[in-house]
Amino acid sequence: MTGSMSDVVGKSRSVIRAQWYLRSATTVARTVRLEGRPAIQNHGTLIIEDRVQIVSTVATTELAVGGGGCLEIGERSLVNYGTAISAQELVRIGPRCLIGTYCLLMDNDFHRIEPERRLERPTSRPIELAENVWLGGRSVVMPGVSIGAGSVVGAGSVVTRDVPERTVVAGVPARVIREI
């Protein structure tokens, strides 16, 4: 019985921690759980739905929303430690997604490639993960990419183009490995 009571207390603490650390969010469901101390900056719209879990224990998880930007994390999704998500326009993570450790999702590169234009910010391009997407650890999702429902991105991959639903991709740049 003692183990069960400590589990309840631990879950209660993680729910309270989520409400505290995510207090700048536009909407946070009462069932969101958070472990550790994330870095949160919200200058736009931050929506975190039911039963989302955010882990920021081993390394800081960063969620940043720029002015006019929108970051949505769908119900029952997991964002693991060390992950950084930046939404200057839109990053939408669908329900039941699993975001591995140290992943990077940014909808803007924050500077142009041309040396004479490096101080100019390019146009943002939305990132969308459909339902039940799994990003392996240290994956990078580049601006403008959509990942279809039920897809898997292999660890350490850099996703530069859209991924069809129920597809496994891996590599740098990520290529289709197989369909599921």
Image (cartoon, grey):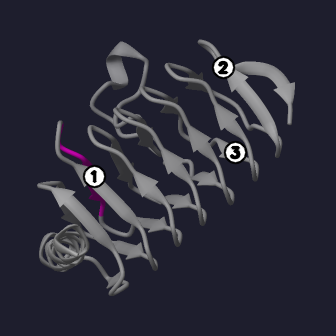
Q: Which residue is mark 1?
A: 55
Q: Residue furthest front?
A: 1
In the rendered image of this protein, does residue 49 appear above or below residue 121? below
In the rendered image, residue 6, in percent from the top left (x then y), is placed at 16, 70
Q: Which residues are magenta?
A: 59-66
Hey, which quadrant is residue 130 in on the image? bottom right
Q: Is residue 31 left or right of residue 149?
A: left
Q: Amino acid at mark 2?
A: Ala
Residue 65 colored magenta?
yes
In the rendered image of this protein, does residue 100 appear above or below residue 176? below
On residue 92, which mark appears? none
Q: Quadrant of the C terminus?
A: top right
> Could you say whether the residue bearing mark 3 is in a helix, strand or loop?
strand
Report crowding for label 3: few under 14, some 14 to 19, many 20 or more residues within 10 A (C-alpha).
many
Q: Which residue is mark 3?
A: 147
Q: Earlier in the sequence, mark 3 or mark 2?
A: 3
Q: Residue furthest right?
A: 179
Do residues under tags 1 and 3 come within 8 Å of each other at their CB atoms?
A: no
> Could you say whether the residue bearing mark 1 is in a helix, strand or loop?
strand
Report crowding for label 1: few under 14, some 14 to 19, many 20 or more residues within 10 A (C-alpha).
many
